[in-house]
Image (tube, grey):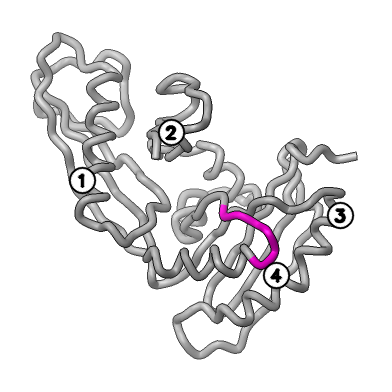
């Protein structure tokens, strides 16, 4: 019997296709998959068809899982996804650039985004590179040194109104939105690997990209700043 904690549900949506996976995290396999091609001539998601697709599949998923589906990870392929790039520079008053300074920069970046893009839902926060005293780095090292640190960010986000529509539809089936991911980012990250789409989603969702900042709920027990990847409280 598959334990409930071993399962995740992924709902992939685009104007022309819906896919749903019931994914076994323990052995990285699909317990269930269903997809539908849509005859949609626009670039927008048809929410009525999405509702029908979920109505068709949620009961099947719950019967197979032996439990209610409580939450779903949404994977979006849509032109409404925006990409915003900016950098944050902070002076360093210590000899070593440490994780505390980086954490302060991460918090500043999130606050700056929230202030300027209030009606947007953050999907991914990616760190493109680090810059200290004339030197660029693609990953963070524990022993940077320098008088300042600049971090270049890429925020992937989508309209809060779009997410509200999704939440409304999921609510009809007593399902909560666990997170949102950008399908193009996922596929581009694994462009040289031949692995299942659902495995790609699982890996990105669970911190495979070490330069992605993960937003986690404040009520989750704090595990330390760096375990497998950057974390930032939402």
Q: Which mark is residue 54?
A: 4
How far apart are the alpha carbons under marks 3 and 1? 44 Å
| Residue under the image location 61 percent in, 45 percent down | 202
Q: Which one is nearer the viewer's eye here, 74 or 127?
A: 74
Q: Start and end of the magenta stretch?
A: 172-177
Q: Are marks 3 and 1 in contact (CB under 8 Å)?
A: no
Tag 4 or tag 1, which sits nearer the N-term?
4
Tag 3 or tag 2, which sits nearer the N-term?
3
Q: Which one is nearer the viewer's eye here, 74 or 197?
A: 74
Query: For numbered disc 4, what is the local secondary structure?
Result: helix
Tag 4 or tag 3, which sits nearer the N-term?
4
Residue extending furthest toward the top:
95
Circle 4 residues within 10 Å: few <14, some 14–19, many ≥20: some
Tag 2 or tag 4, which sits nearer the N-term?
4
Query: For numbered disc 2, what is the local secondary structure?
Result: loop
The label nearer to you, 2 versus 1, is 1
How far apart are the alpha carbons under marks 3 and 4? 15 Å
Circle 3 residues within 10 Å: few <14, some 14–19, many ≥20: some
Q: Is residue 173 visible?
A: yes
Q: Which mark is residue 210?
A: 2
Identify the residue position indicated by label 3 in the image: 64
**Position in image of residue 169 (x %, y %):** 60, 69
Query: For numbered disc 1, what is the local secondary structure?
Result: helix
Q: Is residue 72 above or below residue 148?
A: below
| Residue under the image location 50 percent in, 55 percent down | 180
Identify the residue position indicated by label 1 in the image: 112
**Position in image of residue 44 (x %, y %):** 46, 80
The C terminus, quarter of image: top left
Q: Which mark is residue 68?
A: none
| Residue under the image location 65 percent in, 75 percent down | 51
**Position in image of residue 23 (x %, y %):** 73, 49
């Amino acid at each position: 019997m598959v334990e409930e904690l071993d399962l995740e549900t992924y709902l992939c949506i685009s104007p022309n296709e819906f896919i749903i996976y019931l994914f076994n995290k323990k052995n990285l396999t699909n317990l269930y998959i269903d997809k539908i091609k849509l005859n949609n001539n626009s670039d927008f998601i048809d929410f009525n068809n999405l509702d029908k697709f979920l109505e068709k599949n949620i009961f099947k998923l719950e019967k197979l899982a032996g439990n209610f589906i409580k939450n779903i990870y949404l994977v979006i392929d849509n032109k409404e996804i925006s990409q915003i790039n900016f950098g944050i520079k902070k002076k360093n008053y210590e000899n070593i650039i440490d994780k505390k300074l980086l954490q302060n920069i991460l918090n500043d970046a999130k606050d700056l985004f929230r202030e300027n893009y209030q009606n947007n839902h953050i999907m991914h926060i990616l760190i493109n590179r680090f810059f200290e005293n004339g030197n660029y780095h693609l990953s963070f090292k524990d022993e940077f040194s320098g008088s300042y640190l600049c971090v270049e960010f890429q925020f992937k986000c989508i309209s809060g109104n779009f997410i509200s529509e999704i939440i409304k539809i999921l609510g009809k089936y007593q399902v909560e939105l666990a997170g949102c991911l950008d399908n193009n980012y996922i596929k581009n990250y694994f462009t040289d690997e031949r692995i299942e789409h659902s495995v790609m989603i699982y890996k990105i969702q669970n911190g495979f990209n070490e330069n992605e900042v993960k937003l986690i709920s404040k009520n989750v027990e704090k595990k330390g700043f760096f375990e497998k990847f950057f974390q930032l409280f939402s």
